Structures are given as C-alpha cells and as structure tokens.
Amino acid sequence: MGKTLLIIGVHVEELRLGERVAEGARELGIDVLRIEHGLSNDRFLYGNIFYYDTFLRELYLQTHMQIQGNYSLAIDLHAGVNQAGCCADVFCKETSVLDCLNSVLQNRLFLLSEKVRLLKIVKDMAARPKFADLSYLSCKTFIPEAVWEGRHYHYVGLEIYLPRPGQGSREDWLFARQLVKCIHECGRKLKE
C-alpha cells in the first residue's frame, strides 16, 4: 500500500489552487483525486445548512471508500484567505504525524515552519489532552470521523491561506507544494 493521495476540489473555489499544487505532487509520485463537482464554500447557496452538511458528509464518505485499502496517507487540500500573507494550518488526529512534520519543518525548513500551524483533531474539545499532545492546538472538524480517525490510513487536512481569494500566486503554489512534500515524507517515514 504505502501510497499517498492528494485530494483537491472538495470546494469548487479551491480547485484552481489544487490543480497548481497537484502539478508538483505528481512529480513526487503522489496520486491526485480531483473532485470534479465539489461543493461551493457559500453555504447559503444550499438554502439550508442541513443540506450543505449532508452533501459534504456524503462527498467525504465516498472519498473515504476510494482511499481505504489503496492509500496509506491522504492529504486533503483546502484554501482560505489571510490578507497578511500566505500561511497554513495542518490538521491531523495522529500525534506521530504532527511530531514528524514538526521535526521536518524545524530541521530543514525553519522559515517555512513560522508560517505553519499544526493542529490535533479531537472528538471532544473539553477532554483533557494527553501529555504528548500539549504541543499542539486542539480542533474539531466537520469531516466525518471515519475519514480523519486514522484506522485505515493517515488523514491530514491542509488549509493554505492565500492573501486573496483565487488560485494564488506561484509563490503560494510552491509553499503548498513544499508542505505536501513534507507531509508525504512523514507518511513514508511512518510506514517504515
């Protein structure tokens, strides 16, 4: 198994950025799952938040079925806006993945590490974190637990914040590609 999958286009507004980042991912031997008809980030288009949440849940559960048994690592690429400049959040349930990524960023890409925030996905925000998890901020996610829980593969959410909406600049793509490369490298280390 041991393969990595990059998921792009869960939200239609993120697809153009995803395509640019995927160009670099393919060079690393990472497979790409391009969601042709993703959801809009504009929840109001659906008229009811229930329908939006239901569509998103079904999209992720279908994706989960494609990942399970075929990949050991799934990187779920998203885009947000930060007018102060490009930066990123990395979300994962598994402390070992976050520890590896933290080490890679600190040792080889220190300047990049200042623009990256690592977050641990938890079920219950009120639960007391384990000692090993105190280095990371805790977060909840709207993604179904079957996807991020990590029983069959490592799930890593990657949110790239761009200075303005759209596909980003060449520098933004290179930043995102470097993070995808680091995550991919950690996935390979964890399977060894």
Image (spheres, grey):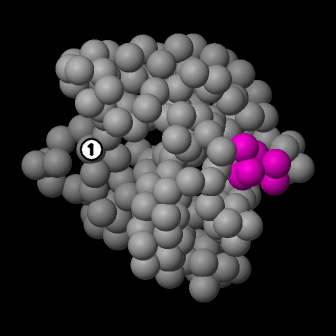
x and y percent of residue 3 in the render?
A: 76, 35
Q: Residue at x 52, y 41 (%)?
A: 13
Residue 79 appearing in the image = yes
x and y percent of residue 154 in the render?
A: 56, 38
Taking the view exactly as shown, the residue that stands out farthest to the left is: 126
Question: 19 and 175: which one is in front?
Answer: 19
Instruction: Specify the segment rendered in magenta.
Output: 18-24
Question: 191 and 62: which one is in front?
Answer: 62
Amino acid type indicated by mark 1: Lys
x and y percent of residue 129 in the render?
A: 22, 56
Q: Quadrant of the N terminus?
A: top right
**Does 38 sit left or right of 167 as displayed?**
left
Instruction: Tell me if residue 23 is in the magenta stretch.
Output: yes
Instruction: Tell me if residue 25 is in the magenta stretch.
Output: no
Q: Residue at x 67, y 39 (%)?
A: 6
Tell how many labels. Answer: 1
As drawn, 134 above or below 69: below
As drawn, 140 above or below 103: above
Q: Residue at x 50, y 69 (%)?
A: 163
x and y percent of residue 88 in the render?
A: 49, 64
As drawn, 111 above or below 69: below
Looking at the rendering, which quadrant does residue 19 occupy?
top right
Taking the view exactly as shown, the residue that stands out farthest to the bottom is: 111
Disc 1, SS? loop
List the residue tagged with mark 1: 140
As drawn, 130 above or below 155: below
Q: Residue at x 72, y 38 (%)?
A: 4
Q: Report the predominant secondary structure element of the magenta stretch.
A: helix
Q: Residues within 10 Å of mark 1 (few under 14, many from 20)?
A: some
